[in-house]
Each structure stands twice: as structure tokens, then as C-alpha cells.
Image (spheres, rainbow, N blue to C red):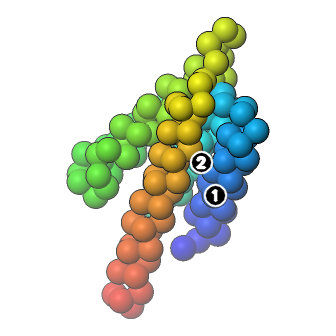
Amino acid sequence: MNDEIQKLLEKSEEAIQVAEKLLKESYFSHAASKAYYSMFYAAQALLKSEGINVIKHSAVEAMFGYHFSKTGRIDPKFHKMFIEARDVRELADYAISDDIIGKVATQKVEDGKEFIKAIKSLLNKKEQKHENAN
């Protein structure tokens, strides 16, 4: 695994840890936002492992769906999870009067942890396959 992919995974792990801390302090909107970013960085890492370098949120979402969800390389629930997290993040970051309630934020943090775990598993399998081929 190259350094850039590793750094994105580390950033993803850090974001989910921050999300958990924010959730404990009842900063629900911020926790939901950070949970989304944990998924975003993990998805970018996975895409980079395929030589796909995209940075726009919509492009990461689309390429993740096209290359992994639609092909069955990852359970499509993770693409849906990613899309929903982005929707919640946009509400959390940009809405003035609508705040993210604890239940929604808690679910997004749990989704983020599950998403990261799935991405890391896929990357590990890919790495093992590469090592066995050499």
C-alpha cells in the first residue's frame, strides 16, 4: 500500500475518532459531518488503490459507486451509506435552523466505522492478492 493511500486511511481513522468524541459531547451536527469525512477519505483511498484520483465529493461518490458498488466488489449498501452520510453532512454543515439529532448522528458515526472496516478489508485482500502474485 503506498504512502498516499495509507495517509488517507489514517485521516479516515482520525476523523471517525473525532466524530466519536464530538458525539459524546453532544455536538451532533459536527459528529455527523466528521463521520461523513471519515467515509470520504476511506473511499478516496480505495479509489487511489485503483489509480483513480478524484477529489470532488460528487466525483468520489460517483466513482466509488461505479467501480465498486455496481460491479459487486463491495456491498452496494456502502455506496448508499456514503450517499446518505453526504446528505446529512450537507444539512449539518449548511442548514442554519435544522440541527442533527443525536440518533441520526450516532447512526452516521456507526456507519462510518462500518464503512472504514469494509474499505480496509477490501484493501487488505487486494494487498494479499498482490503479494501472492509476486
Residue 64 vertical position relative to residue 45 in the rendered view, above or below:
above
User: Of the residues under marks 2 and 1, which one precedes in the sequence?
Assistant: 1
Expressed as whole percent of the image width and height from the top left, the position of residue 4 reads 63, 63
Q: Is residue 29 left or right of residue 113?
A: right
- In terms of secondary structure, where does tag 1 sit? helix
The quarter of the picture where residue 31 lies is top right
Q: Is residue 133 left or right of residue 105?
A: left
Q: Quadrant of the C terminus?
A: bottom left
* Amino acid at circle 2: Ser
* Amino acid at circle 1: Glu
The structure residue drawn at horizontal position 56% and vertical position 44%, both measured from the top left corner, is: 109
Expressed as whole percent of the image width and height from the top left, the position of residue 110 reads 51, 47
The structure residue drawn at horizontal position 29% and vertical position 52%, both measured from the top left corner, is: 75
Most distant residue in the right direction: 25
The quarter of the picture where residue 6 lies is bottom right
Circle 2 residues within 10 Å: few <14, some 14–19, many ≥20: many
The structure residue drawn at horizontal position 42% and vertical position 60%, both measured from the top left corner, is: 118
Name the disc covering residue 13, or none: 1
The structure residue drawn at horizontal position 60% and vertical position 23%, both measured from the top left corner, is: 100
Name the disc covering residue 38, or none: 2
Q: Which residue is more in the foreground, 60 or 27?
A: 27
Q: Which residue is more in the foreground, 116 or 28?
A: 28
Most distant residue in the top direction: 97
Whether residues under marks 2 and 1 lie with C-beta atoms below 8 angstroms apart, the answer is: yes
Q: Which residue is more in the foreground, 91 or 105?
A: 105
Expressed as whole percent of the image width and height from the top left, the position of residue 114 reads 46, 54
